[in-house]
Image: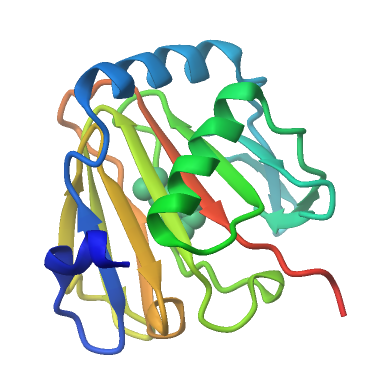
Amino acid sequence: MNLFDDNSLQLPNADLKLHVGWLDRATADRWLTQLTAETPWQQPVVHLYGRQHPVPRLVAWYGDAEARYRYSGLTHQPLPWTALLAQIRTQVVTAVEQPLNGVLLNYYRDGQDSMGWHSDDEAELGRDPLVVSLNLGGARRFDLRRKGQTRIEHSLVLEHGSLLVMAGPTQHYWQHQVAKTRSACAPRLNLTFRLIRPCE
Ligand SMILES: O=C(O)CCC(=O)C(=O)O
Ligand SMILES: [Mn+2]
């Protein structure tokens, strides 16, 4: 992954690289417009203690047929790759030199859309998962804290066209969030590419 060697974040027990400006502006603009328009967005409802909570963002899951994925407490069958998402996957796979068979699209309509603290440590991602996250649209803050702690230890701003690569033990030791914000922010589309391993 030589492309990213100068972009490492020095956090213990983590392997995080942020490549700012990975995509040129015109391509990032075009992908944002097309993906926003053509994605069949869903807003899953999570059942917690007998109450129903719509997740505070819109989502879609695409991938190879075997890439069934659990998130927000539900199992999702992947949608087949569109021409554009297949092209984006090829570019991402070429950059990281690792296979990836699914992508979760998260659409944050405004500053009230968010994603709570979690690690991408689902069993189907295996040990030391690679999670490659492409950012389009409005910049948002991405916070990191150690598992078992409440203090935010590090924050990044994920800007239009940037690529964040999380690998190694990151998901084992760290959690991340995209918090709500009162600041005005443009709609944001985040694509996290993953490798779903077949069930044992
Ligand atoms: O929107 C982001 O940057 C984070 C997305 C994320 O953590 C996820 O999809 O698991
Ligand atoms: Mn995540």
The location of residue 57, given as percent across then percent down, is: 50, 34
Left or right of 15, for residue 157: left
Q: Quadrant of the C terminus?
A: bottom right
Left or right of 117, for residue 65: right
The location of residue 15, given as percent across then percent down, is: 31, 77
For image coordinates 21% across by 22% down, the residue present is 25
Vertical order, 44 against 74 (above or below): above
For image coordinates 82% across by 44% down, the residue present is 77
Q: Nearer the viewer, residue 16 or 145?
A: 16
The location of residue 60, given as percent across then percent down, is: 63, 34
* Display coloring: rainbow
Residue 122 visible in image: yes
Q: Find residue 33 and report its image quarter.
A: top left
For image coordinates 38% across by 78% down, the residue present is 170
Q: Find residue 197 and report its image quarter.
A: bottom right
For image coordinates 24% across by 59% down, the residue present is 3
Q: Nearer the viewer, residue 56 or 79?
A: 79
Number of numbered tags placed on the structure image = 0
Left or right of 51, for residue 133: left
Q: Find residue 67 and report its image quarter.
A: bottom right
Residue 56 visible in image: no
Q: Specify the farthest residue to the right.
A: 200
The location of residue 151, given as percent across then percent down, is: 20, 75
Q: Quadrant of the N terminus?
A: bottom left
Vertical order, 197 against 80 (above or below): below
